[in-house]
Image (cartoon, rainbow, N blue to C red):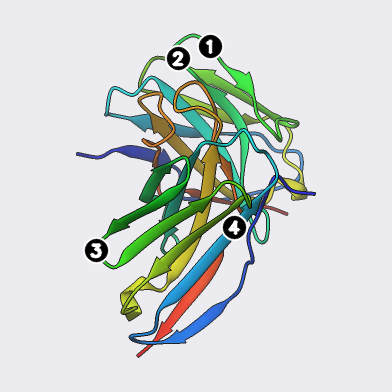
Amino acid sequence: NAGVTQTPKFQVLKTGQSMTLQCAQDMNHNSMYWYRQDPGMGLRLIYYSASEGTTDKGEVPNGYNVSRLNKREFSLRLESAAPSQTSVYFCASSVGGARGYTFGSGTRLTVV
Amino acid sequence: QKEVEQDPGPLSVPEGAIVSLNCTYSNSAFQYFMWYRQYSRKGPELLMYTYSSGNKEDGRFTAQVDKSSKYISLFIRDSQPSDSATYLCAMSVAEYGNKLVFGAGTILRVKS
């Protein structure tokens, strides 16, 4: 049982480049989330999708876009990467309840 | 002021010690409280889940919620080197339909 799978695991971008972070879950969960984790800041919500076909902004959405491709997949796109977007990005999914968040192993992104 | 405050540590203890990890929060509407454990270079995993005030015990772990003081704690008895990780508190207003708000995480190191 894979759970939540994120690709890639590591990425280095130059300022201004674009990229898409991929996330897929195989637990038939309704809700999916993108977080970023920075030292001393904890996990901050970027975007979330409560159900297939819907997306909403979280706490720090600027500079990002998302696509809920189907129930399994939720991608995060950086259109023009900036050094401030250097972070570890986590995707999570849940059946819809507060207790059932399952996280992926993260994508370590460095923007130079 | 952050909605959820958590001392980042690091907290260093000898093997076998009792560990106390804490979070304070400002939103009195929070009712669901969670502790996540995150090993280095991994995603967070749910450790404990409690609703409203009171205590919950699971093996060596006890979660405590004091809503009157807006204060939650996680106690680890007989701490082991394998408990070395970052512990994040998280909370939510409702069980369904609301997003989790995370603390910054406390780094715990248990020395053998």
Residue A100 in the image: above or below residue B56: above
Determine whether the residue tagged by mark 3 lies in a helix, strand or loop. Answer: loop
Task: Tell me the amino acid under the disc marked 3.
Answer: Gly
SS type, badge 1? loop
Same chain for mark 2 and mark 3? The answer is: no
* Amino acid type, callout 4: Cys
B53 or B91: nearer the viewer: B53
Query: Which element type, helix, strand or loop, lies under badge 2?
Result: loop
Mark 1 → mark 2, Cα distance in angstroms: 6 Å
Binning the other alpha carbons within 10 Å of mark 4 as few (below 14), some (14 to 19) or many (20 upward) gives: many
> Residue at label 2?
A51
Q: Nearer the viewer, residue B57 or B38?
A: B57
* Disc 1 residue type (three-letter): Thr
Q: Is residue B45 left or right of residue A44?
A: left
Q: Which mark is residue A54?
A: 1
- Residue A58, percent from left and from top: 65, 29
The quadrant of the rendering that contains the C terminus of chain A is: bottom right
According to the picture, the residue beneath numbered tag 3 turns out to be B59
User: Quarter-wise, where is residue B39 in the image?
Assistant: bottom left
Question: Mark 3 and 1 residues: CB-CB less than 8 Å, in contact?
Answer: no
